[in-house]
Amino acid sequence: MSGKHTWYTFGSSVQGATHVRNHIPNQDAIEWLASYERQQELVLVAVADGHGNPRYFRSALGARFAVQVARTLLEQFGRHYGQATDLTVVEQMVEQQLAHLLVRQWNDTVDVHLAAVPFSPAELAGLDAPFRPKLAANPRLAYGSTLASTLITGTFILYMQLGDGDIVTVNTDGVVSRAPLVVDPQLSGDVTTSLCLPSAWRYVRTYLQPLVAHPPAMIMLATDGYSNSFVKEDGFLAAAQDIFDMIEPQGREGICTLRKYLPRWLTATTAQGSGDDISVGIIYRIVR
Amino acid sequence: MNQLLQLGQNVALKMLNTDCKIEKFLGGGAQGEVYQVTIAGQPMALKWYFPHYLKQDPTLRQRIEQTIKFGPPSDRFLWPLEVATHPQANDSFGYLMPLREARFKGLVDLVARRVQPSFRTLASAGFELAHSYLQLHARGLCYRDISFGNVFFDPASGEVRICDNDNVDINGVQGAIGGTIRFMAPEIVRGVAAPDTETDLFSLAVLLFYLLCNHHPLEGKRESAIRCFDQAAMTKLYGTAPLFIFDPKDDDNRPVPGEHDNALAFWAIYPTFLRTIFTRAFTVGIDDPGHGRVRESEWRTALVRLRDSILYCTQCRAENFYDAEALRATRQPPVCWACGQSVSLPPRLRIQQNGEASVIILNHDTQLFPHHIDSNRPYDFSTPVAAVTQHPSNAQLWGLKNFSNIKWVITPPAGPPRDVPPGRSVTLAAHTKLHFGPSEGEIRV
Amino acid sequence: MNKLPGGALASRPLHFFWIVDCSGSMAGKKMQELNFAIKESLPEMRKVAEENPNAQVFVRAVTFSSGAQWHVARATPVAEFRWEELKAGGETSMGKALKMVADQLSPEALPGRGLPPVLVLISDGRPTDDFNSGLRALMEQPWGKRAARIAIAIGDDADVDILQKFIGHPEMTPLVAHNAPDLVKYIKWASTAVLKSASSPTSQMETNQAGAGAPVGITVPLPAAPEPAQDVEDVW
């Protein structure tokens, strides 16, 4: 596929309007990468949403760790397997190792941080009594976060998600649909699965898709602050469509326009909508 | 978002001499994608392969056509029915199969805790899996790619569906596919054997362990040690140095709390006889591939026995298991795993057949089937021969009702033998003996 | 570039329910005190809502006596919400009231993007109908289970065990009001502090996820298990 198109990627993460009012920092995080080193295509986006409840008082850090670990891991995975012709082997590695490694590496990162910066009395003071023993048994709870990510190489697209958030694809005809990840009925309302849960690897959902005739023209990843801002689900999907419609006629100019306007769009959206932190990553394919 | 076929496109079905329209994208993976189509008003599924995948598996088409001719071993298999082609896409092909109904959930859903079935369902599903593979093997076929992506079950009943029957072939034929490494027999992972019915048996054992313990039997401490993508480490874990997580002689691969909690929790709940057979499957079954593997018929017997051992905690109603060996060893009443209270044993029926005894717990919802009474009868769970029943006017009185078409003769603890014609019930009184014909039972309380 | 991508935006809906006991024992002074306390709380409730523009608070009220009915059936934006005084008389059909609230919390009635609802149950006595089935109907709704459930007991005759069951968390107990100032204070707390914390977008894990190691054999509601019996007929 490389040589026929180029993938561009851009993202933005804004502090939620409610967080601004309540002096809480942005608890989302985002990482993105588009690399064409050594003729090897590697494009990825990862967004993470730290839990807002005061119990998860280091979740902004947890989200930061989540996207960093995802970026490192997916980059490694992409370099290792990005040129593979036998995708059933790659699929097996995804199913067997990816979820475990993601959680293990996130756990390791959290553990190192906690050892260097133990919980302070001030941090613990605000906690409700029933939560204290749970935190004592599992200190990683304080760092809880979700993760949604996508990796594109020369031969495949890999979707990987844990918890809430949305990954949406747009085809060349401008038709929007959700990425083919399993829908998790445990995610509804404000409840989500998380990296900090024991055996969190169970909740990681993945999908490996070979790149063939009709790859997506655009992929949008977003934390749930974005979809929660729209009155209807269609309104949220229309956002992906509108962004695609804006970029499409302009090509690379469109990406520049996106870079200029995405942060202010998101800031306005949180103010008029959910009030939550919003992070959006866009991957766009331009045919040469 | 699908990539191979466009929604609304038509594909041709040669044998049925008709076209069908692609309606909906259902899912897919590295091999191909699955779509929903309608044939004669009936929704069905169509799998379509990626052209590059066909290059890796050159005999696939031939194998699919052969499989279509064989026909499914039973209705539990979602079997290829017909080859599909498309004039503009002649670098690939697909096949038509029955659609998996929405009520079936995958083992993937079980592992992710999106579905939480009862132990009864798990035992039933396990039985159906062993039974289905037995039927496949009895026809001289082997599955070759058993994995939990292929297996689905109805959380309400335990009824199963087995999908992705693309790799089925005649036993002994060499093929490109080895299967999913975690389900592959170690000798295949090591590269010293090819898939056949014996290696299928290992995969079945892994599948059953997954179903019942919600965890992989070889993934314990040694799996936790893997910290980066490492093909060599996987080959060691599943091929060159596989070690059962509950191996009685070597605890180097025990489950790690916090990562492998399910394995620890479930293993402790099951009765001794089940743990024994699993241990055998992953010790002798690993060391002696030719003769040491647990056979499907043994799994069937064990899973039926597991279901017959279910009893309900008198305090919290959680399902527990009757464990004769543990009771004999400890001489204590069992303790409920859910609430920690002592469980009083309900009445049970001890049946002797051909010198072998089996115990069936008599819960309010217990049913007996033909094989319970006559071990020569095949398994048939559609028609009970007996069921526990409550007296119509005395709610304190429970009995066993004769749903068969022959009369039983009972010998009450104090009194002469009596007949129990079809439709009548016998009170569950201690030491009542029942003569069913080929077998004899006694009520224990 | 002035138009934002996507469809209509709106703040997240937050549904607040007063569930009020209007049985005979509430008649007179108690009912008047309650009417007063709720009216007192409205200005501050509006203020909290204004301070949290990203939550759109809708208020409803259901009362129960002999049977249950909507006092305010329409989900009313808090700025427009007015409290018409209640009168008391009759039994205590608390179960029915819970069932009516449950019906309004179905996924069809409340969209997924909403904030968890707040339910405030106020009672001075014991339910005279099937409370358990009403509570079960409520807890079977995901929005019912995730709702912030508060209970205020008026006086010492209230059944605090039932109210605790409604709350469903060991961390919180029913607030028992023995006098008018207490009642005003608790009503204010329920309508402002609780509302304020409910208005913040937070994600969290379901509490039973934290113990996600234990198997979940289904607990089966059963009739009494078969017991052996003596001195009865052998065959029937």
Image (cartoon, coloured by chain):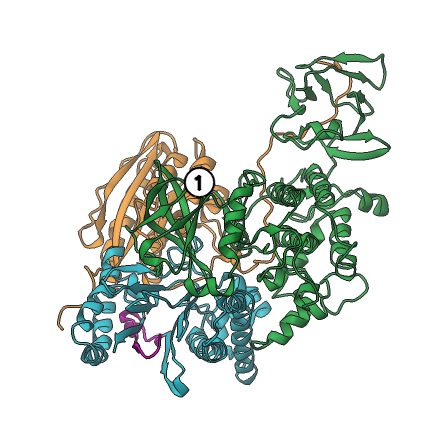
Q: Is residue C201 left or right of residue C80?
A: right
Q: Residue at x 19, y 55 (%)?
A: C79
Q: Quadrant of residue B354?
A: top right
Q: Is residue C155 visible?
A: no
B412 in relation to B96, above or below = above
Chain painted in orange in the figure: C
Of B386 and B64, the residue lying toward us: B64
Crowd tier of the residue under label 1, counting other residues whose Cα lies within 10 Å: few below 14, some 14–19, many 20 or above:
many
C71 in relation to C167, above or below = above
The C terminus of chain B is located in which quarter? top right
Q: Position of residue B153 (x, y in %)?
A: 54, 45
Q: How many tags in the picture?
A: 1
Q: Is residue A46 left or right of residue A7?
A: right
B48 in relation to A88, above or below = above
**Disc 1 secondary structure class:** helix
Three-letter residue code for mark 1: Leu
The N terminus of chain B is located in which quarter? bottom left
Q: Position of residue A158 (x, y in %)?
A: 42, 68
Chain painted in green in the figure: B
Within the magenta stretch, is there residue C209? no
**Dot 1 corresponds to which residue?**
C135
Q: Residue at x 47, y 55 (%)?
A: C172
Q: Quadrant of residue B347?
A: top right
Q: Position of residue A287 (x, y in %)?
A: 26, 75
Q: Is residue B428 visible?
A: yes
Chain painted in cyan in the figure: A
For the record, the magenta segment spans: A1-26
Q: Is residue B74 left or right of residue A172?
A: right
- Farthest residue to the bottom: give it: A38
